[in-house]
Amino acid sequence: MIIKVQTHELRTGMYVHKLEVFWLKDPLVHNAMLLTTEQQIQGIVAKGIQEVWIDLDKGCGVASPTEEMVDGSEAATGGPPVDIHEEIRHAQAICLQAKGQVMDMFSDARLGKTIDTASTLPLVDEIASSISRHPAALLSVVRLKTHDDYTYLHSVAVCALMVSLARQLQLSEWLVRCAGTAGLLHDVGKAGIPLEILNKPGKLTDDELTIMKQHPVIGEALLRKSGGHESVLDVALHHHEKINGSGYPFGLQDEAISQLARMAAVCDVYDAVTSDRPYKAGWNPAAAMRQMASWEGHFDRTIFYAFVKAVGIYPVGSVVRLTSERVAVVAEPGEHSLLQPKVCVFYSLKTSQYLGRQVVDLADSHCQDSIAGPEESARWSGVNLNELWMQPVA
């Protein structure tokens, strides 16, 4: 649903469908955008714009923003999530088990053995159960992967993201399971790529990229040989297709790409760009959401904005700048709104000094602070950010 609102009612998390102005030609203010920072809102106000149209299907609304951005887990499980730090312990064990299982699967594929796709179902169910208990825990833990772990834990991350997205889209539990399985196996074709290319600590050459782009076809063939479900084969083959036809391997467009493959395209790219690589630091999750929203023609827009609602604009582990000119890391999602999480403050921009760890609940009625926008994680590489958010929050 698209409605008109006053600019003073704008808040982060809204999706601006159209500005109520026709003469504006400014590269800093786009007609359609996801609002992730206060600076974007100030930019609109500074142009003298009085009213804008917002899309309630792609972002939060005015009257009840908490209802728009509420975490999807309660709807899926029928109850509130468990304590995040309790679930983090379970998630760490799941990731350790999953890494070993995915490594074995890739090893078998390299040796030409068939892949026992049925054996992955208990792992998919474990991941889905963890997501049900607390959606943020496993997604936060799997983001801690190293370069050596990337190929294997990327599969686990995409599995978890697919489960979260499928539930946000209110798919049947059978399709949720299919989505998770497809996410876990989407990159199995990389087992057929030479290791010197797969593990290259730098940008691939054009020739190497051509070889790497063969992995969807290789993966589909491996899974077909192993008797995998058609939906899983489809995702392995088509997760790099783009809505505008610029993807590979076939340049499919729009509805020619299945729903699960369109979902996988979003989940795969999000985890890839937010992960640290030897040649590039991962993007802050909030910055990744903003960049991905600007890529016209890459993703199915309905699916992408469902993904934003499922994962949140500021996921756990995101580094954010507060309106008080302090820097913090998101420690827990907000109970009712992902725009008002609990954060761990650690630095003052006013005094240029590090602060003792201080937990601030931005949803507290007495709290005068709020998120102004994302900070680049690479700027704070000297701070053990993971230690900050992984400590229990009182």
Image: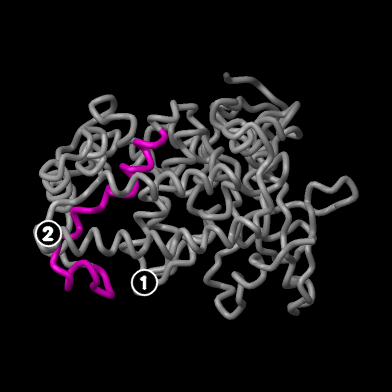
Distance Cα–Cα, label 1 vs label 2: 21 Å
At which x and y percent is residue 9? 74, 32
Q: Nearer the viewer, residue 183 or 227?
A: 227
Residue 15 in sight = no
Q: Quick one: label 2, few (<14), some, or many (20+) residues within 10 Å?
A: some
Q: Report whether 341 appears left or right of 75.
A: right
Q: Earlier in the sequence, mark 1 or mark 2?
A: 1
What residue is at 65 percent from the left and 58 percent from the top? 86
Q: Give the main secondary structure of the magenta stretch.
A: helix
Q: Is residue 361 left or right of residue 206?
A: right
Q: Which residues are magenta?
A: 176-203
User: Comparing marks 1 and 2, which lies closer to the viewer?
Assistant: 1
| Residue 299 appearing in the image | yes
Q: Which residue is mark 2?
A: 211
- Look at the image and say whether residue 190 sits in the magenta stretch: yes
What percent of the width, then of the height, locates residue 224?
Answer: 13, 41
Q: The N terminus lies in which quarter of the figure? A: top right
Viewer-nearest residue: 314 or 98: 98
Q: Quadrant of the C terminus?
A: bottom right
Q: Is residue 65 above or below residue 27?
A: above
Give the residue at x 42% y 54%. 157
Q: Amino acid at mark 1?
A: His
In the image, what residue occupies the spot 57% across and 55% down? 137
**Which residue, given by chain and number where applicable, does mark 1 sit on?**
147
Q: Quadrant of residue 154?
A: bottom left
- Tell whether position 286 is magenta: no
Q: Residues within 10 Å of mark 1 (few under 14, many from 20)?
A: some
Above or below: residue 186 compared with residue 230: below
| Residue 144 picture location, percent across and down | 49, 66
SS category of the residue bearing label 1 = loop
Q: Secondary structure at mark 2?
A: helix
